[in-house]
Image (cartoon, rainbow, N blue to C red):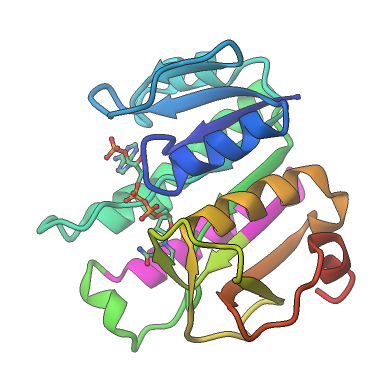
Amino acid sequence: MKVAISGASGKTGFRIVEEALKKGLKVKKIVRKNSNVKEDSKNSETLRVSLNDKDALDKALKNVDALIIATGARASLDLTGPAKVDALGVFRQLQSCKRVGIKRVILVSSLCTGKLFHPLNLFGLILIWKKIGENYLRNPSFEWTIIRPGGLKETEKIDSENIDYTKEDTQIKGSIPRRLVAKCCIDSLINKGSINKIIEVTSSSENKKISFKKAMQTI
Ligand SMILES: NC(=O)c1ccc[n+]([C@@H]2O[C@H](COP(=O)([O-])OP(=O)(O)OC[C@H]3O[C@@H](n4cnc5c(N)ncnc54)[C@H](OP(=O)(O)O)[C@@H]3O)[C@@H](O)[C@H]2O)c1
């Protein structure tokens, strides 16, 4: 299977690439012109395109079986970032998927999307724009999965962390290492039980261990 991963230069994106490669998948990293990405390997290549360039995006997404979207507005003083990246950027990627015939799409979103009164919205109403991005994907044209993580952590210490997988709008706080989010993306890709689901994820050492496959039976 060949998977395209957009936002592959991000802190979650590069880990999704690593987890995909560990599973023996072929990877196309979709990044911006000046993004910093790790070197390519036998099974990975880097395509530098603007999400605004239809033709280049279509070319980059040709001949892949699935797209994992890990783009997200980087914190900055430009408060239009979330509208441009988390809504319009997702829309443009999905339009390209339709044109080139990609059906399977996994989106990294966030807990609390759609909530108006939330401190995260001080950054350009990000939770509203993320919900709009999600809604573009929840469409019969796609076999979609939306992963909504809690606050993202850089730690690679994940051995004692167990994931709490729940359905839409059930968790409002908590955190999770980016590494576990990356694993969830690849688990979603591999398990058909994740199709057409919103999966909220946080982690803690106090949660009971459960396999991804089993968790999907309850969501
Ligand atoms: N931070 C949190 O606690 C938190 C919690 C829940 C959900 N999330 C969401 O989880 C996702 C991953 O977060 P993260 O912190 O791992 O991401 P990150 O490190 O900030 O990476 C963001 C990625 O998006 C790309 N990007 C940004 N603007 C772009 C544009 N205009 N065109 C194309 N690509 C663009 C970046 O490319 P460059 O490398 O070129 O900048 C980078 O690859 C994001 O959607 C984020 O909103 C975050």
Can residue 143 be seen here? The reply is: no
How many labels were placed on the picture?
A: 0
Task: Residue 198: give x, y in percent of width and height.
Answer: 68, 66
Task: Residue 179: give x, y in percent of width and height.
Answer: 52, 53
From the viewer's side, name the closer residue of 35 and 125: 35
In the image, what residue occupies the spot 40% across and 71% down?
128
Left or right: where 141 falls relative to 218: left
> Which residue ends up furthest to the left in the rendered image?
77
The quadrant of the image that shows the N terminus is: top right
Q: Is residue 133 magenta?
A: yes
Q: Is residue 109 above or below residue 57?
A: below
In the image, what residue occupies the spot 46% across and 56% down?
156
In the image, what residue occupies the spot 33% across and 67% down?
126
Q: Which corner quadrant of the image does residue 31 belong to?
A: top left
The quadrant of the image that shows the C terminus is: bottom right
Can residue 66 be seen here? The reply is: yes
Left or right: where 9 falls relative to 215: left
Q: Which corner quadrant of the image does residue 167 belong to?
A: bottom right
Q: Is residue 25 magenta?
A: no
From the viewer's side, name the closer residue of 65 and 54: 65
Task: Residue 46: give x, y in percent of width and height.
Answer: 44, 18
Task: Residue 173: give x, y in percent of width and height.
Answer: 47, 85
In the image, what residue occupies the spot 36% across and 21% down?
49
Q: Which corner quadrant of the image does residue 127 belong to?
A: bottom left
Q: Is residue 147 above or below residue 34?
A: below
What's drawn in magenta, residue-wise?
125-146
